[in-house]
Image: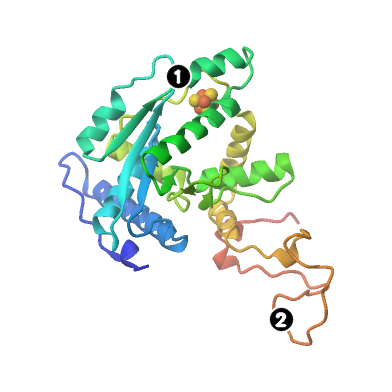
């Protein structure tokens, strides 16, 4: 696939008389970074191909607004033709402002579909008061999205998970499920019938927050269902933020590690054939170093630069 995805210049933002030159420059840099990171993910994982009909799932949150916004910019300059169809599921949560998204999407001029399904009442009926409703709610939502994807002849389902969601999921799996498993940038859905993509996989949440503020997206609050927050996810989020505060750059380093997996240095019998290991007689940088401590290239591991050991 052509590098045009990431190489084209972004047109300068319109001049805002209220904004200072510095803010304008920063915003322009942010836009370039977002386009580059999304374009890179699309290229690296071959997320979008010629003729694709991409269902962009929009919830009314900053991440999905950002995803749609950046995908539209990339679509305009992409080396291939593909369609974007924004889809929102109105779950009939009390107080859901159902006019906001249709009005926004109409103004944007993007084809869209609003699917209205009262999953809220079902979940309320089935889950006892005070218990978390999220797992049933997401299961229902998933089924509906797959059906809608079939009806709209969708070839890829795009979700707005970003780098920090991926890292949180990685640590949730490690801490609470005993697995080294993150959130894939591209994978076949659990029903085997759809390809799910996460074009924001390389994007930091703080950049999406800044972009949402700059673009003044009409954010719909995500607390309308009244469900408890996932406390484990919240804990992990706090842990990652705290690490980043103490060791700036650590988030980026950890994220990079997800793309540099060395199965021979882990212990999973399914990923590496430990049982049949034989000497090769050929020196290998990645071979076992016996007692040697691993050396870490400090310059390329910004999260470790400020690590201080006592004594
Ligand atoms: S927070 Fe509410 S809408 Fe979101 S998955 Fe949980 S129950 Fe469903």
Under tag 2, what secondary structure?
loop
The disc placed on residue 118 is 1
The correct choice, above or below, for 93 with respect to 170 in the image is: above
Counting residues from the start of the chain, the first of labels 2 and 1 encountered is 1
Please identify, in this view, whether the residue under mark 2 or under mark 1 is nearer the observer: 1
Q: Locate residue 254: give its quadrant.
A: bottom right
Mark 1: is the Cβ under 8 angstroms from ligand 1? no
Under tag 1, what secondary structure?
loop
State the residue in front, 295 or 306.
295
Query: Is 106 left, or right, of 223 in this rendering?
Result: left
Q: Residue at left 62%, top 47%?
A: 170
Query: Is any part of residue 61 visible from this angle?
Result: yes
Query: Is any part of residue 211 visible from this angle?
Result: no
Residue at the spot of label 2: 284
Q: Residue at left 63%, top 14%?
A: 130
The correct choice, above or below, for 284 with respect to 57 in the image is: below
Give coordinates of residue 164: x percent, y percent.
52, 45
Crowding around mark 1 (Cα neighbors within 10 Å: few <14, some 14 to 19, many 20+) is: few
Query: Is 280 left, or right, of 143 in this rendering?
Result: right
Tag 2–tag 1 contact (CB < 8 Å): no
Give coordinates of residue 65: x percent, y percent.
35, 38
Crowding around mark 2 (Cα neighbors within 10 Å: few <14, some 14 to 19, many 20+) is: few
Give coordinates of residue 236: x percent, y percent.
62, 38
Q: Quadrant of the C terminus?
A: bottom right
Q: Residue at left 42%, top 40%?
A: 150
Q: Locate residue 280: give its quadrant.
A: bottom right
């Amino acid at each position: 696939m052509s590098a045009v995805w990431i190489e084209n210049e972004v047109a300068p933002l319109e001049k805002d008389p209220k904004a200072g030159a510095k803010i304008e420059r920063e915003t322009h840099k942010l836009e370039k970074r977002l386009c580059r990171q999304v374009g890179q993910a699309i290229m690296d994982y071959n997320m979008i191909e010629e003729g694709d009909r991409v269902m962009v799932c929009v919830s009314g949150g900053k991440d999905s607004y950002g995803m749609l916004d950046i995908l539209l910019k990339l679509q305009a300059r992409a080396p291939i033709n593909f369609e974007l169809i924004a889809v929102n599921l109105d779950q009939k949560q009390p107080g859901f402002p159902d006019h906001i998204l249709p009005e926004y999407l109409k103004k944007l001029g993007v084809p869209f579909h609003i699917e209205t399904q009262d999953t809220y009442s079902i979940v309320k009926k089935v889950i006892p008061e005070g218990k978390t409703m999220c797992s049933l709610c997401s299961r229902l939502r998933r089924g509906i999205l797959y059906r809608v994807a079939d009806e709209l002849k969708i070839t890829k389902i795009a979700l707005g998970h970003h780098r920090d969601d991926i890292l949180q999921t990685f640590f949730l799996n490690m801490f609470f499920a005993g697995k080294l498993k993150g959130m894939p940038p591209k994978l076949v859905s659990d029903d085997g019938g759809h390809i799910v993509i996460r074009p924001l996989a390389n994007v930091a949440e703080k950049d999406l927050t800044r972009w949402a503020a700059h673009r003044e997206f009409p954010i719909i609050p995500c607390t309308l269902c009244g469900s408890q927050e996932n406390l484990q996810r919240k804990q992990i989020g706090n842990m990652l933020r705290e690490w980043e505060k103490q060791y700036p750059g650590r988030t980026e380093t950890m994220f990079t590690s997800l793309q540099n997996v060395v199965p021979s240095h882990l212990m999973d019998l399914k990923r590496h054939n430990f049982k049949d290991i034989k000497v090769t007689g050929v020196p290998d940088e990645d071979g076992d170093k016996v007692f040697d401590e691993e050396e870490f290239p400090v310059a390329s591991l910004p999260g470790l630069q400020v690590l201080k050991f006592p004594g």
